[in-house]
Image (spheres, rainbow, N blue to C red):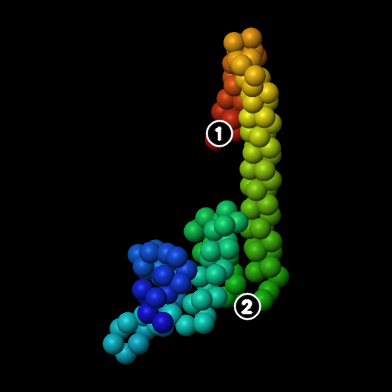
Amino acid sequence: MKIKEFAQKYRMQADTIRFYEKENILKPKRRENGYREYDEECEKQIQLIIVLKELGFTLKEIQRLLILRNEAISTSCNNSTVSLLDEKIINLEEKIQFYQQALNVVQTLKELVKEEKYLENKEVIEELILLFFKSVHERGM
């Protein structure tokens, strides 16, 4: 299929597809007339890219995984893949911890302001916000 049809199928802009090609994470075949041809292999690649992006992988990380995917199976390749996945697991665990903390703050704020209790809890709210700010600031977010 051509780029326009391919992009529509995966709800992307054609420019995004071209960018992925430029970054060597999507490799369509070329027809004799120079047009790109997106085949079943391209569909598998874009599906993998979409899943990895949804999992929080950056384009650089996706590039690394795709390079490793195309290498011969070896201990070195396996170790590199496991290392990259370990880094992502740590990153995701940190994000989960942050969002759990953020959820707790929002739930606490809700309890402190509902039933028009904002004024009586204003100092507690300000302290809660300050503590959360310090926590976020220390993490470098």
Residue nearest the observer in this picture, 19 or 105: 105
Q: Is residue 22 visible?
A: no
Q: Give the left or right position of residue 63, taking residue 101 as reference.
A: left
Q: Please report the residue visible at 68 percent of the width from the left and 37 percent of the height from the top.
A: 100
Secondary structure beneath label 1: loop
Amino acid marked by disc 2: Ala
Residue extending farthest to the front is 115
Q: Give percent across and percent down for residue 85.
A: 66, 58
State which tag comes first along the sequence, 1 or 2.
Answer: 2
Q: Give percent across and percent down for residue 31.
A: 35, 87
Q: Quadrant of the C terminus?
A: top right
Residue placed under numbered mark 1 in the picture: 140
Per the rendering, the mark at residue 132 is none
Q: Is 46 rendered above or below residue 57?
A: below
**CA separation in Å, label 1 and label 2:** 38 Å
Secondary structure beneath label 2: loop
Q: Quadrant of residue 138?
A: top right
Q: Quadrant of residue 21?
A: bottom left
Residue placed under numbered mark 2 in the picture: 72
Is disc 1 surrounded by few (<14), some (14 to 19) or many (20+) residues within 10 Å?
few
Q: Please report the residue visible at 37 percent of the width from the left and 79 percent of the height from the top.
A: 2
Q: Please report the residue visible at 62 percent of the width from the left and 78 percent of the height from the top.
A: 72
Q: Give percent across and percent down for residue 120.
A: 64, 9
Q: Is residue 114 visible?
A: yes
